[in-house]
Image: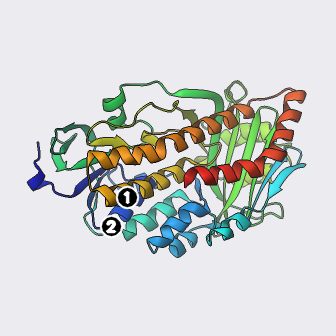
Amino acid sequence: MPGAADSAGKLLIVGGGIGGLTAALALHRSGVEVQVLERAATLEEIQVGSGITVWAHQIAGFRDLGLADELLGAGAIVERLEYRTSSGRLIGGWDVGETARELDAKNVTAPRGSFHAVLAKALPDGVLQLRRECTGVEQNGDGVRAGFADGSSVAGDVLVGFDGFDSAIRAQLLGEEAPRVVGLASWNTIVEFQHPGAPQHLQALLFGAGARFLYVPVGNGQFAWIAAMRSEDGESISEDQPKRDLLERFGDWAPPVAEMIEASPESQVRPVLARDRPPAERWGEGRVTLAGDAAHPMTFFLGQGGCQAIQDGFALARAISERGPTAEALRAFEADRMEKTAWIVQTSNRMARSVRLKSPPALAIRSLVMRFAGPRLYRALLAHVR
C-alpha cells in the first residue's frame, strides 16, 4: 500500500470517457496531479457512439478551461427543441438558445467521438494511459492502490471510478446489481442528411404509440438519430437488416423520419440498451468513490448521461481543489451531486416509460403534459446541474 510520501497529491481516475477526461482537465488546471487509467487499447475504441448534447451549463464550465470554442466547433449549435406527434403535429416547442444566452453560453450537439477527441487532445502527455483494465482497488488510511489485469498497479491518494455502466469499481463497492430495464428496444446512428424538415439548429422528438424518434444536427451536414419502441414491438428488428424493419415501424411517420432512416448506412445502425439502475444510497467508501455512469447510470431519454458525467467532473475538481485529494473531499463531492443526479435518473426513467404508452387516452394525456411541462422540465434540469 502507498504512503503519503510516495503518493502526495495524486488522484487516480479509472475510466477515460468524457466525464473522466473532464475531471482530469479541471483537476490539472487546479494543480492536482491526476492519472487517467482506461481499459481501451486505442482512443477510437472510446470514441464510438452516436451524438451527445451538451447544454449551456456544461459549456460555461468548459469556457473556464479554455475549451468552449473548440467544443462548440465540434458540432452544431442547438437553438430550438420541439416535441411533435408521429404525424408531425407540434405538441410544444421552446427556444433553448435563449436560456443558454442567459448564461452567456450555447448548447451544442456533436458526435460523441469528436467531443471526446477535443478533451483528449487538451490533456497533457502521459495523463491518459490506455490498456489499463482495472480489476479492483485496495485502500488504507494513507492511500489507494489500483490493480490491473496485466498484474501491474498504480498508487495514489484517492480514486474515482468513472468506469461506466458496468463499473468494476462499483461492483467492488456496492456488489453486483442487475440493471433496471424499461421495456424499450432502441437503435441509433449518425448520417449525412439534408431535408427541409431538419434544419441545422433544431432538436426534434416525435412521439407515437409505443415509440419515439429523436433527431438532432451534429455538424458538418450530419444528424444523429435514435429510434425507440416497446420491446415487444421491437423484437422482430433484424440485427442484419435493421433499416428494413425500422422503416416498417416508422415509415408512415412525418418527414423526415423515414428519409433519415433510409439514408443511413445499414452497417452503422446499432442497437442501444435502454437501462439504468435506481439511485444508490452511497457512492463511495473511504478514499474511493464513483462518478458518471458508474455512480448514476440513467436511460438516454433526457439526454443527460454525458452531461451529468461532465458536471461530476467539474464538481469533483471543486471539491478536491478546496480540500485536497482526501476522503473528506470525496464525501463533499457526493453530498453535492447525489441528490441532483438521483432526481435526473428517476425523471429520465419516467420519461422512458412514457414512451411505452399506446392507448389513445394515454397518448392524449402525455401530449398535454409535455406541452405544458416541457419548458419547466428543461429549466428544472438546469437547476439540477448547478
Residue at x 17%, y 49% (from the top left corner):
155
| Quadrant of res 364 | top right
* C-alpha span from label 2 to label 1: 7 Å
The amino acid beneath tag 1 is: Ala
Percent coordinates x, y for residue 45 in the rendering = 41, 52
Left or right of 381: which side holds 203? right
Residue at x 70%, y 24% (from the top left corner):
232
Asked if residue 299 can be seen in this view, the reply is no
Q: Are marks 2 and 1 in contact (CB under 8 Å)?
A: yes
As drawn, the label of residue 317 is: 1
Percent coordinates x, y for residue 138 in the rendering = 19, 37
| Quadrant of res 323 | bottom left
| Quadrant (top left, top right, bottom left, bottom right) of the C terminus | bottom right
Position above or below: 67 against 142: below
Left or right of 211: which side holds 281? left
| Quadrant (top left, top right, bottom left, bottom right) of the N terminus | top left
Which secondary structure lies at badge 2?
A: loop
Position above or below: 245 against 56: above
Percent coordinates x, y for residue 111 in the rendering = 56, 60
Percent coordinates x, y for residue 218 in the rendering = 63, 63
User: Could you say which is closer to the camera, residue 218 or residue 296?
Assistant: 296
User: Could you say which is closer to the camera, residue 236 or residue 150?
Assistant: 150
The residue singled out by tag 2 in the image is 30
Which secondary structure lies at badge 1?
A: helix
The amino acid beneath tag 2 is: Ser
User: Could you say which is closer to the camera, residue 60 or residue 263?
Assistant: 60
Position above or below: 104 against 376: below
Asked if residue 195 can be seen in this view, the reply is yes
Badge 2 or badge 1: first in the primary sequence: 2
Residue at x 61%, y 60% (from the top left corner):
55
**Around disc 1, counting alpha carbons within 10 Å, would you say few (fewer than 14), some (14 to 19), or many (20 or more)?**
many
